[in-house]
């Protein structure tokens, strides 16, 4: 029954398709026929309209061309042809049997056109093509009419259409056999479901092996729902265990994530002393990858004797001897770092679970401690030397008395220079302290830069001449004004000039220059001194840092001058740039913003 119903559906569907295709073919052929008639009619009208009226119309001497051309009327669609005057009278006409010529109608403005003539009783509709006669003195027109194609005129190709319909109809058995073959697995599935339904009626209702596809799909969906519910029930039994396992995994991953986010590197050793956990910070600190630490023995990946000895101690020591231990060393693979490594036993519930090793980068603390020690030594030397000189010249004054005025003048000048040197050091220390405490706030005013630079140059000229160094001032008188704290900016300039004089060569020169850029004013201190290496140039503005010197001429210093100058420039929202090469001198440039145009009339200091 099911197969018969499918066959009937295929037959009816194929007949509907055949009917639709035949209708479309007939319509297409009728449209083509109408286009051919239209092309023939317009072409004939244009050809006849080019002839004179005397040639088209008949006369006593000879018949008209219209009669001669259209006398042979073998075209079944031809209806009539006529030469009509403006008043509607036909000067010449020829028509098919039984055709009554319709009256002429006025021509359109465009000339050649066509119209559909309403059919008379028992006659077919006629499409008339017409156009004006080119050589006529009056308004004459040529008209040619053709019958409209009948719908049944295309039935002459009925045999061809029948062959197409037959070919399409013969496809139905092929389609039916294909569908039957494809539905064979569904039939086998229906038999299997029927067997399952017979064995387990509670899960699946009765299934007929030969029922249609819809019923089979419905029963199959029911069976799948029952199977899914059963599977869901089985999965529920494992939910508690999986939840517990995931909770433990989450806690473990969370703890590892926390450890990995710590800034220090960490190692966890088990009771046997083998590494069981390591964070990613270990690699940049020790220069060894985490994979090597976890997979290789201690003696293989650890290249630092201090660290290897400490870890070996925790491996061999008993639980009671595993106290906290801290070492400091520089790793062999990263020699520019200084590390603190602390090992602590992990105690809990009267037992030791292993050892926690924390590796901390103490490079900055080590450098700061070393710089602080160097600074104390330098400051002590800087204070001790002037005191010794002052004491020596004080004794000289006491011994000389009033006898030698030259000695007294020299002693007083030296004592004054040393007092100024000590005062400069103390002032720098106080200013650095204010900077770090945040109590130094510049009081900015509009300042004439040329006056400020001339004052700074005049103050430094005596120190330069005392050392045989030529000091020059290069700037324009109309240099733009800047907004600075005059006293603080003078401290920065004095420190730069003092450095340029101190680290210069005998007979050298120092240039204090000012120039204007697009939006900045650049104050530069250039010297012909010893210069700096690139690694020193990158750190010369750090606190307590001093350029390494070689040779017998060692210059003293406390490493605060350039640090203080750089901090003061940054307080004024400027920047200090350094250009230097060893043996070719240095250029320290201060870049400051120009005063806005609205402030030109402000008070100038």
Image (spheres, helix red, strand yellow):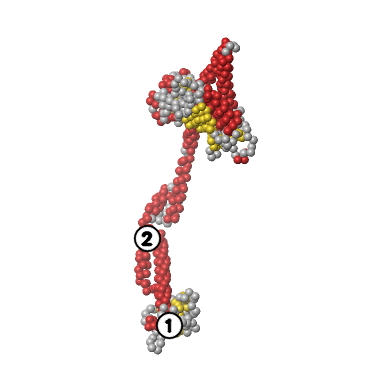
Question: What is the number of the mark on residue 440?
Answer: none
Camera-nearest label, 1 or 2 = 1
Residue shown at 52% from the left, 20% from the top: 378
| Left or right of 75, for residue 405 | right
Q: Secondary structure at mark 2?
A: helix
Residue shown at 51% from the left, 23% from the top: 467
Nearest the viewer among 89 and 442 is 442
Residue shown at 41% from the left, 28% from the top: 288
Nearest the viewer among 239 and 203 is 239
| Left or right of 193, for residue 463 | right
Q: Quadrant of the C terminus?
A: top right
Q: Secondary structure at mark 1?
A: helix
Q: Is residue 244 visible?
A: no
Could you give the CA–CA distance between mark 1 and mark 2, rounded to whole angstroms? 70 Å
Q: Is residue 589 visible?
A: yes
Nearest the viewer among 95 and 522 is 522
**Where's residue 282, x and y in %?**
45, 28
Nearest the viewer among 14 and 397 is 397
Q: Are marks 1 and 2 in contact (CB under 8 Å)?
A: no
Residue extending furthest toward the top = 399
Task: Categorize mark 2 by other alpha carbons within 10 Å: few (<14), some (14-19), many (20+).
Answer: some
**Where's residue 475, x and y in %?**
54, 34
**Where's residue 420, x and y in %?**
57, 21
Q: Quadrant of the N terminus?
A: bottom left
Q: Earlier in the sequence, mark 1 or mark 2?
A: 1
Q: What residue sits right under mark 2 in the picture?
A: 176
Residue extending furthest toward the bottom = 60
Task: Categorize mark 1 by other alpha carbons within 10 Å: few (<14), some (14-19), many (20+).
Answer: many
**Where's residue 190, x and y in %?**
40, 52
Residue shown at 61% from the left, 35% from the top: 446
Question: Residue 591 lies in what quarter of the image?
Answer: top right
Q: What residue sits right under mark 1 in the picture?
A: 53
């Amino acid at each position: 029954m099911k197969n018969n119903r499918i066959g009937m559906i295929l037959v009816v569907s194929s007949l509907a398709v055949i009917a639709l295709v035949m209708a479309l073919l007939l319509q297409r052929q009728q449209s083509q026929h109408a286009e051919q008639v239209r092309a023939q009619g317009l072409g004939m009208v244009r050809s006849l309209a080019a002839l004179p009226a005397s040639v088209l119309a008949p006369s006593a001497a000879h018949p008209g061309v219209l009669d001669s051309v259209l006398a042979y009327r073998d075209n079944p669609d031809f209806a009539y042809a006529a030469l009509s005057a403006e008043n509607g009278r036909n000067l010449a006409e020829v028509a098919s049997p039984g055709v009554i010529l319709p009256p002429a109608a006025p021509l359109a403005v465009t000339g050649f056109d066509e119209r559909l003539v309403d059919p008379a009783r028992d006659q077919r509709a006629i499409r008339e093509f017409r156009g004006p006669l080119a050589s006529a003195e009056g308004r004459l027109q040529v008209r040619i009419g053709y019958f409209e194609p009948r719908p049944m005129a295309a039935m002459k190709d009925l045999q061809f259409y029948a062959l197409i319909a037959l070919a399409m109809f013969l496809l139905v058995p092929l389609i039916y056999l294909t569908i039957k073959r494809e539905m064979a697995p569904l039939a086998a599935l229906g038999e299997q479901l029927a067997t399952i339904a017979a064995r387990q009626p509670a899960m699946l209702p009765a299934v007929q092996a030969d029922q249609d596809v819809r019923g089979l799909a419905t029963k199959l969906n029911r069976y799948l729902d029952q199977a899914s519910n059963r599977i869901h029930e089985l999965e529920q039994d494992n939910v508690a265990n999986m939840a517990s396992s995931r909770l433990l995994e989450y806690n473990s991953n969370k703890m590892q994530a926390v450890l990995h986010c710590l800034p220090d590197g960490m190692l966890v050793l088990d009771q046997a002393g083998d590494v069981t956990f390591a964070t990613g910070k270990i690699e940049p600190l020790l220069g060894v990858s985490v994979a090597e630490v976890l997979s290789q023995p201690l003696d293989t990946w650890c290249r630092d004797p201090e660290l290897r000895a400490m870890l070996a101690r925790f491996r061999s020591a008993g639980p009671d001897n595993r106290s906290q231990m801290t070492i400091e060393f520089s790793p062999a693979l990263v020699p520019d770092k200084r590390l603190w490594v602390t090992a602590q036993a992990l105690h809990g519930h009267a037992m030791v679970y292993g050892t926690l090793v924390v590796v901390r980068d103490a490079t900055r603390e080590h450098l700061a401690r070393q710089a602080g020690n160097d600074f104390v030594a330098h400051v002590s030397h800087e204070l001790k030397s002037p005191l010794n000189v002052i004491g020596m010249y004080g004794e000289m004054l006491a011994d000389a008395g009033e006898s030698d005025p030259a000695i007294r003048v020299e002693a007083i000048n030296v004592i004054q220079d040393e007092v100024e040197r000590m005062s400069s050091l103390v002032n720098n220390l106080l200013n650095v302290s204010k900077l770090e405490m945040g109590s130094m706030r510049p009081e900015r005013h509009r300042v004439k830069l040329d006056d400020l630079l001339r004052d700074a140059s005049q103050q430094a000229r005596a120190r330069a001449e005392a050392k045989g160094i030529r000091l020059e001032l290069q700037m324009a008188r109309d240099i733009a004004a800047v907004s600075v704290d005059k006293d603080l900016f003078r401290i920065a300039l004095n420190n730069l000039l003092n450095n340029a004089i101190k680290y210069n060569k005998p007979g050298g020169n120092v240039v204090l220059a000012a120039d204007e850029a697009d939006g900045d004013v650049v104050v530069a201190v250039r010297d012909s001194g010893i210069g700096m290496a690139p690694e020193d140039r990158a750190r010369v503005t750090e606190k307590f840092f001093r350029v390494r010197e070689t040779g017998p001429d060692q210059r003293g210093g406390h490493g605060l001058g350039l640090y203080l100058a750089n901090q003061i420039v940054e307080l004024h929202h400027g920047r200090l740039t350094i250009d230097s090469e060893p043996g070719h001198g240095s250029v320290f440039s201060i870049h400051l913003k120009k005063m806005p145009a609205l402030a030109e009339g402000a008070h100038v200091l």
